[in-house]
Image: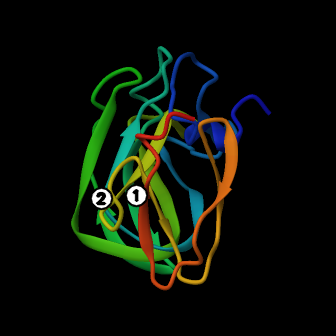
């Protein structure tokens, strides 16, 4: 229960339980078959993945070494021999080509050593369809947002649009 899925997506890796981990014993001798899946809710395009090891003394031993990147059920790319950059250090793993999907699965088949489980401190898909700090809003959608302390409604969008949330005071 201390290594729940949402902790890999919360943007931090501040201590040894701020991570996602599989059950101990799921990897025998560093080999296994575990996965984590993200449903974006809409089709998105990513061109890389940021990943950090767990902030723990065993950070290098349980970090994914070999894994597949699966987009909407199909293997899009296989990574082998990945090495963690350091204890809790966020590193960029570039993709050969951008991947467009709604469901992104990382299927881990080998880890750094003979640890008995997988841990990831932080996982961030890097989107190329919408700039960082923005969100993509689909056509026909109206959203509520806060501006200077009051709730406002957006226009009904005629086409997909990128909205910059990083500059909003609220």
Say if mark 2 contacts mark 1, CB within 8 Å: yes
Q: Give the residue drawn at x 48%, y 40%.
A: 168
Checking the image for residue 129, the label placed there is none
Secondary structure type for disc 1: strand
Q: How is the image coloured?
A: rainbow
Q: Nearer the viewer, residue 18 or 10?
A: 10
Instruction: Please indicate, yes or no, whether residue 81 appears anywhere in the rendered image.
Output: no
Few, some or many residues within 10 Å of mark 2 (<14, 14–19, 20+): some
The residue sitting at the right extreme is 1
From the viewer's side, name the closer residue of 67 and 150: 150
Nearest the eye: 139 or 104:
139
Q: Is residue 140 visible?
A: yes
Spot occupied by residue 70 in the image (x, y as percentages of width and height): 45, 71
Q: Name the residue beneath numbered marker 2.
A: 79
Is 114 placed above or below 72 here? Answer: above
Residue 25 in percent (x, y) is at: 66, 40
**Placement of 61 over or under 72, stated as above or below:** above
The residue positioned 57% from the left and 57% from the top of the image is 35
Element type where label 2 sits in the image: strand
Q: Is 101 located above or below residue 9 in the figure?
A: below
> Residue under circle 1?
67
Sooner in the amino-acid sequence: mark 2 or mark 1: 1
Look at the picture and state if 56 lies above or below 94.
Answer: above
- Residue 76 falls in which quadrant of the image? bottom left
Which residue: 57% across, 39% down?
A: 8
- Image point (51%, 25%), residue name: 13
């Amino acid at each position: 229960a201390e290594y729940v899925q949402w902790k890999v997506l919360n943007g931090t890796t501040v201590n040894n339980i701020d991570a996602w981990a599989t059950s101990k014993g799921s990897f025998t001798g560093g080999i296994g078959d575990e996965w984590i899946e993200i449903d974006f809710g809409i089709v998105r395009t990513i061109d890389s993945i940021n990943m950090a090891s767990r902030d723990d003394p065993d950070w290098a031993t349980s970090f994914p070494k070999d894994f597949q990147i699966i987009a909407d059920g199909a293997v899009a790319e296989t990574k082998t021999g990945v090495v963690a950059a350091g204890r809790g250090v966020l590193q960029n793993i570039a993709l050969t080509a951008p991947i467009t999907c709604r469901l992104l699965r990382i299927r881990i088949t080998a880890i750094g050593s003979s640890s008995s489980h997988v841990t990831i401190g932080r996982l961030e898909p890097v989107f190329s369809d919408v700039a960082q700090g923005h969100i993509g809003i689909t056509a026909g959608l109206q959203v509520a947002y806060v501006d200077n302390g009051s709730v406002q409604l957006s226009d009904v969008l005629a086409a997909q649009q990128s909205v910059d949330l990083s500059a909003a005071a609220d």
